[in-house]
Amino acid sequence: MKIAVISDIHENFHNLILALNIINERDVDQIICLGDLMNTGVAKILSIQKMPSHLIWGNNDGEKVEIVTTALRPQSNLTCSLSTYDFLEYDGRKIFATHYDDLAVPMAKSGLYDAVFYGHNHILKVDKIGDVHCVNPGEIAAQKTGTGSFIIYDTKANEIETIILENIVTLKSDLTMDYFNKHIEELGFRSKDAMQLKSEN
């Protein structure tokens, strides 16, 4: 099973599209998002992907009620954690996923998990503590580091692959709902869905 782990999107729709294009090309089975969407449009995009997405809450997600409402819609492929961390299991691999970086090392040192994924500080870091992967996928936003990145975790091989995005955008003015509305069909929405989402925004 292939799991894409993304974090800290900060409403950068352009870079999110780049990441999702790669994720779809690579036949990823599951997306884990470690929070900081900053715009409910990000949740709407994740909710209509062909593979399921699971959101871990960050400290900058936008309107949580609207995000949960999106997740609860019929045919939505988005689920949400109850907190800023979650205990997950895929293919027998135990995963601790959290937004905050301060929980990562202690949970990895516990030895209870195959992988620990964390975000928040936007810094790409792929480590191992004992036999436990301890990984920050970096930021989709490319806001702090100037680099857009995410990782793919292969549960069968128990291996991490780092993906660096090319042709990223970092200018805030290019990333808002105007961009989302302009490129809404490119993001994968069918025409009916696009009209509905435009009317909601």
Image: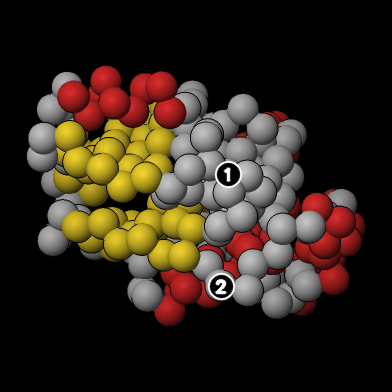
| Residue at horizontal 66 percent and vertical 36 percent from the top | 61
Give percent across and percent down for residue 100. Answer: 47, 27
Query: Where is 16 relative to 108, above or below?
Result: below
Seen in the image, is 28 located left or right of residue 185?
Answer: left
Seen in the image, is 197 located left or right of residue 12? right
Compared to residue 31, the image places residue 121 above or below, namely: above
Residue 140, visible in the rendered structure: yes
Relative to 84, say whether 56 is above or below: below
Residue 166 numbered tag: 2
Q: Position of residue 78 (x, y in %)?
A: 52, 50
* Color theme of the render: secondary structure
Name the quadrant containing residue 15: bottom right
Residue 32 in view in this figure: no
Question: Which mark, residue 133?
Answer: none
Q: Position of residue 126 (x, y in %)?
A: 31, 47
Which of 98/65 is in front? 98
Give the amino acid at mark 2. Answer: Glu
Q: Residue at x 52, y 67 (%)?
A: 165
Q: Measured from the top left, where is residue 59 in percent x and y?
A: 62, 27
Q: Can you say which quadrant of the picture contains the N terminus?
A: bottom left
**Residue plotted at (87% across, 52% down):** 201
- Decide which of 76, 14 is in the foreground and name it: 14
Residue extending furthest toward the front:
145
The answer to whether mark 1 and mark 2 are in CB contact below 8 A is no
Camera-nearest label, 1 or 2: 2
User: Residue 199 occupies which quadrant of the picture?
Assistant: bottom right
CA gap between label 1 and label 2 equals 17 Å
Answer few, some or many: residues within 10 Å of disc 2's Cα (few below 14, many 20 plus, some between 14 and 19).
few
In the foreground, 192 or 163? 163
Task: List the residue tagged with mark 1.
Answer: 8
